[in-house]
């Protein structure tokens, strides 16, 4: 197996997961807190990567990060180099691509916390901030873990976005899934099999972990639908 | 009206009920009495800040602090109101021990020792010894109910604001056996009188209202029917109950 690709993949997945949790926590809390056109719109945008071909996302990101657009030119100025075909560019793509896998379990988890607990906390003088961290989040903690594991696993498994956005640069953008593609192209099936098998075992282990979590089986919410 | 604790006027449509309620609290313990569906809980929720009524004006305390005034577009969020409450359902936080539930509403400096023994006193008052390290999920409904009320009492007693908060209790002891309920009610009344914490509670238990010797606001179909001492307002119910008991 291409160890450099493995290390890169793990680094990418871990960083993506951390960034995603920072974005997904407030976003999911806001989505779960009510109804309305704005929320439906945001939820649709978040869910878009689920239904779009990854190449579409990759294509637009490639354009957005390139010198053809104003934001792209700003990014190039900011980083000193184009983000496409770099680790940072891949990171942005991964965050967007795995966003629904981080957000949806959290939305389901937050919605499953009875509003009565939030009122109970407020009735004891707790601010919304404190209520979120001391009551809602602990009560939805299995969703938090599901969200993290799914975001990580999904990032490990992405291919289309990486190909469009990152190309195939060893140590910078060649992830395991790209490396597997390379090996097959070279007709090196033995090595391809080792890489593929490692990915299967890893994905399986992650899913078993999720289904072992208390609460997931009981409240088959949207996160279960996603995994199925 | 200088000794008024709380003034409320409220118009609100909820379900099929059109509410139009106005009253002033002047006694240390007032009971909202009425049949289920008459709007008692809605009144408590409006005071607590869990509900945005169609039209309402509620002021509290000697300075008539506004909690809500729909005309002036004032709505103080629930956690900033000088109000502490326990709802009908216990809603104990499942990931916290009984003791951690009880201390949840204490401000941090009270927790660190400014009020030593407060929680222990409440634990003994509500007869919760032996439960304090347990998690809520293994407890009986009655135990959870007691802890929920005790939790609100701790929060009200440890309240750090300039005035004493109003304690809202929605059917605090419904479902407990009569003897225990009588004991708790008596203990709680003494405790809250000592801490000078005023109470507005909801009940449809006649015995509870009489035992408290409270001021009673009688509510039916979203209207205040009558307000006054329990012996006057609930005289009819008392007479009927006694007749029933005699005829058996």
Image: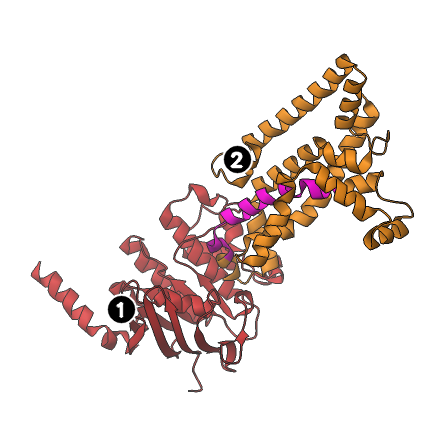
Chain colours: A orange, B red
Image quadrant where one finds the C terminus of chain A? top right
Q: Position of residue B54 (x, y in %)?
A: 44, 72
SS assignment at label 1: helix
> Where B61 falls versus B145 (above or below)?
below
Count of number-bearing discs: 2
Viewer-proximal residue among B88 and A188: A188
SS assignment at label 2: loop
> Where A181 falls versus A111 (above or below)?
above
Q: Nearer the viewer, mark 1 or mark 2?
A: 2
Q: Residue furthest top?
A: A190
Q: Magenta region, mostly helix, strand or loop? A: helix
In three-dimensional space, the C-alpha distance between marks 1 and 2, rounded to whole angstroms, equals: 47 Å
| Chain of the residue under label 1 | B
The residue depicted at 54 percent of the width and 45 percent of the height is A108
Viewer-proximal residue among B53 and A173: A173
Q: Position of residue A187 (x, y in %)?
A: 79, 14
CA neighbours of label 2 inside 10 A, class few (<14), some (14 to 19), many (20+): few
Q: Residue furthest bottom?
A: B1
The residue depicted at 81 percent of the width and 42 percent of the height is A89
Residue that mark 2 sits on: A214
Region rendered in magenta: A93-118
Q: Residue furthest right?
A: A80
Residue A133 appears in the figure = no
| Chain of the residue under label 2 | A
Residue A220 appears in the figure = yes
* B236 horizontally vs A45: left or right: left
CA neighbours of label 1 inside 10 A, class few (<14), some (14 to 19), many (20+): some
Viewer-proximal residue among B76 and A219: A219
Check residue B210 in the rendering and tell me which mark sits there, or answer none. 1
Q: Are marks 1 and 2 on the same chain?
A: no
């Amino acid at each position: 197996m291409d160890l450099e690709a493995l290390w890169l993949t793990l680094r990418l997945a871990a960083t993506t997961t951390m960034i995603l949790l920072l974005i997904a926590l407030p976003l999911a809390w806001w989505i779960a807190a009510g109804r309305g056109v704005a929320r439906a719109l945001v939820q649709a945008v978040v869910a878009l990567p689920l239904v779009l071909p990854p190449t579409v996302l990759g294509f637009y990101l490639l354009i957005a990060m390139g010198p053809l657009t104003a934001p792209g030119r700003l990014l190039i100025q900011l980083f000193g180099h184009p983000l496409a075909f770099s680790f940072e560019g891949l990171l942005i793509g991964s965050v967007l691509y795995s966003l629904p896998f981080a957000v949806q379990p959290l939305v389901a988890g937050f919605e499953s916390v009875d509003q009565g607990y939030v009122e109970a906390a407020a009735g004891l003088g707790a601010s919304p901030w404190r209520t979120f961290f001391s009551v809602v989040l602990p009560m939805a903690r299995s969703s938090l873990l599901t969200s993290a594991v799914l975001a990580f696993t999904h990032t490990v498994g992405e291919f289309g976005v990486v190909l469009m956005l990152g190309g195939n640069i060893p140590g910078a953008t060649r992830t395991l899934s790209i490396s597997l593609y390379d090996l097959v192209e070279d007709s090196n099936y033995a090595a391809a099999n080792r890489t593929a098998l490692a990915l299967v075992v890893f994905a399986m282990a992650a899913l078993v972990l999720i289904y072992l979590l208390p609460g997931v089986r009981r409240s088959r919410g949207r996160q279960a639908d996603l995994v199925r | 009206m200088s000794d008024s604790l709380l003034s409320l006027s409220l118009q609100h449509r909820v379900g099929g009920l059109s509410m139009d309620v106005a009253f002033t609290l002047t006694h240390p313990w007032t009971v909202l009495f009425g049949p289920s569906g008459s709007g008692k809980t809605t009144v408590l929720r409006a005071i607590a800040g869990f509900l945005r009524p169609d039209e309402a004006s509620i002021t509290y305390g000697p300075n008539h602090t506004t909690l809500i005034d729909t005309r002036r577009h004032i709505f103080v969020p629930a956690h900033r109101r000088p109000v502490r409450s326990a709802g009908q359902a216990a809603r104990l936080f499942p990931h916290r021990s009984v003791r951690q539930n009880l201390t949840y509403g204490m401000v941090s400096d009270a927790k660190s020792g400014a009020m030593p023994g407060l929680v222990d006193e409440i634990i003994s008052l509500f007869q919760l010894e032996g439960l304090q390290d347990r998690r809520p999920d293994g407890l009986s409904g009655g135990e959870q109910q007691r802890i929920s009320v005790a939790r609100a009492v701790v929060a009200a007693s440890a309240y750090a604001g300039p005035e004493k908060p109003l304690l809202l209790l929605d059917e605090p002891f419904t479902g407990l056996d009569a003897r225990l309920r009588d004991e708790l009610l008596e203990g709680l009344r003494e405790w809250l009188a000592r801490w000078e914490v005023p109470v507005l509670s909801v009940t449809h238990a006649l015995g509870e209202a009489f035992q408290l010797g409270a001021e009673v606001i009688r509510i039916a179909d979203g209207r205040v029917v009558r307000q006054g001492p329990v012996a006057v307002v609930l005289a009819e119910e008392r007479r009927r109950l006694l007749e029933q008991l005699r005829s058996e």
